Image (tube, helix red, strand yellow):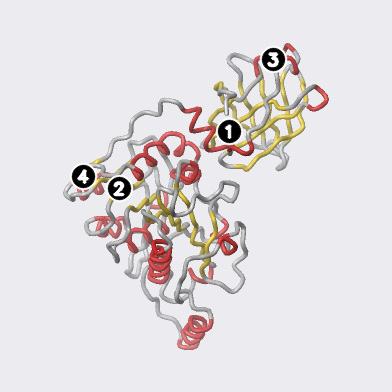
């Protein structure tokens, strides 16, 4: 859900309460860069409109001296009171692994429902945070977001000359007229003027939030007339749905390209091209297994002969999630299955051999079955049995 970027008429009493709330609980007060203790993951909002969190607390930050730069992420608006619980997309995890520090700017749902809407306040807070992190010494500042958060990033970048890049996934806001419709033309207008040094834009196919309108053609027409480098992944990119840029499938296919686009010192003006990913295993590994958590995989001799072909790390794409599995342990009495997914944190789970296949029950009560049929398959079944996904397994490599 995406909110109207203007003040709506409200009764005077409610407006007065809103003004008092701004005074007592100001979302755009003076900002200084947060200390590490202020960036803990999974915080509760308390009485704050805005706060910061590290996107991936299991990955160590690089700091301004070692990082390529800092990415400041704005989430979308889900229409619930807990939009702030949405995790950063997997593609940002890949960028963190490859040299960027990623910070999320979280919003309390009350910041999204006050008179006037959240656009101007969130854009202002984004600018303040970007300036504070720049003062800490980060060489590059990238504003990024999905849906409303993507548009906020564009709007904020248009107000300063000090943003190196914007990454906007399915960006947009509602129109300011009485209909309050989702209006792709608003994004088109800001693309004509936004000041960022380079732009990365994702317009997935079949975006129902925008009525399945094709948006990439207009973006290409606008950006091709500007003298800046841009990465445009449009409806022909193979990514579908309003949240398509938030998926493991997107990270696997386009994460390395986005990483190169943002890190390259001086890409030429014009549309940036993505080369095919030559080693998908490296992307899967970097997405799902931090260096400190790479396990000792089970030796072939540990497994019964019927499932011995399933030894070692293997991966697959289930729907839009990338999953990584591997038998782990030192012997039959310690036989377990590692399961990681871009849509589920995963871990190591007790496993058993059943009907010639390896089976494990995950912490969310879903069941995963690895079968040696063909080149190997994985089947995921929901806890209530109502959903089932199946895919062919692809061999990974056991090296660190």
Circle on res. 323: 1
Q: In front: mark 1 or mark 2?
A: 1
In the foreground, 53 or 120: 53
Q: Is residue 286 above or below residue 357?
A: below
Classify residue 273 by image quadrant.
top left
State how far apart marks 3 and 4 are (Cα).
52 Å
User: Circle 3 — which element?
Assistant: helix
Q: Residue at x 26, y 48 (%)?
A: 219
Classify residue 119 by image quadrant.
bottom left
User: Circle 4 — which element?
Assistant: loop
Name the residue tied to disc 3.
Answer: 308
Q: Is residue 378 above or below residue 77?
A: above
Q: Earlier in the sequence, mark 1 or mark 2?
A: 2
Label 2: how many Cα within 10 Å (few below 14, some 14–19, many 20+): many
Circle on res. 215: 2
Label 3: how many Cα within 10 Å (few below 14, some 14–19, many 20+): some
Label 4: how many Cα within 10 Å (few below 14, some 14–19, many 20+): some
Circle on res. 269: 4
Q: Earlier in the sequence, mark 2 or mark 3?
A: 2
Q: Residue at x 57, y 57 (%)?
A: 85
User: Circle 1 — which element?
Assistant: strand
Give the percent coordinates (x, y) of residue 296. Answer: 68, 28
């Amino acid at each position: 859900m995406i909110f109207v970027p203007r003040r709506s008429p409200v009764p005077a009493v409610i407006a007065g309460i809103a003004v008092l709330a701004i005074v007592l609980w100001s979302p755009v007060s003076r900002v200084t860069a947060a200390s590490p203790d202020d960036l803990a993951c999974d915080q509760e909002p308390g009485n704050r409109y805005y706060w910061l969190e590290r996107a991936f607390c299991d990955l160590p930050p690089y700091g301004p001296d070692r990082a390529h730069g800092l990415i400041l992420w704005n989430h979308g608006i889900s229409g619930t009171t807990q939009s702030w619980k949405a995790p950063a997309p997997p593609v940002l995890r890949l960028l963190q692994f490859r040299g960027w520090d990623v910070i999320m700017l979280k919003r309390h749902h009350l910041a999204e429902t006050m008179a006037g809407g959240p656009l101007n306040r969130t854009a202002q807070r984004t600018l303040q945070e970007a300036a504070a992190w720049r003062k800490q010494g980060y060489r590059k500042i990238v504003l990024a977001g999905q849906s409303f958060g993507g548009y906020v990033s564009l709007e904020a970048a248009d107000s300063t000359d000090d943003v190196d890049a914007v990454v906007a996934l399915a960006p947009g806001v509602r129109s300011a007229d009485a209909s309050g419709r989702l209006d792709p033309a608003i994004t088109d207008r800001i693309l004509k003027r936004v000041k960022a040094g380079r732009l990365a834009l994702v317009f997935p196919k079949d975006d129902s939030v925008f009525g399945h309108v094709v948006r990439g053609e207009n973006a290409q027409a606008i950006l091709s007339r500007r003298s800046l480098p841009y990465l445009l992944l449009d409806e022909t990119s193979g990514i579908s749905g309003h949240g398509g840029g938030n998926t493991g499938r997107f990270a696997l296919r386009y994460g390395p390209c986005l990483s190169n686009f943002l890190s390259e010192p001086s890409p030429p003006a014009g549309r940036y091209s993505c080369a095919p990913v030559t080693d998908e295993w490296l992307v899967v590994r970097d997405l799902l297994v931090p260096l400190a958590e790479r396990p000792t995989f089970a030796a072939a001799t540990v497994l019964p002969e019927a499932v011995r072909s399933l030894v070692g790390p293997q991966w697959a794409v289930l729907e839009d999630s990338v999953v990584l599995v591997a038998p782990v342990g030192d012997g039959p009495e310690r036989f377990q299955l590692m399961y990681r997914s871009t849509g589920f944190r995963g871990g190591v789970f007790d496993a058993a051999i059943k009907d010639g296949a390896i089976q494990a029950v995950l912490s969310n009560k879903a069941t995963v079955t690895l079968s040696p049929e063909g080149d190997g398959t994985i089947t995921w079944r929901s806890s209530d049995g109502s959903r089932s996904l199946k895919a062919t397994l692809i061999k990974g490599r056991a090296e660190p």
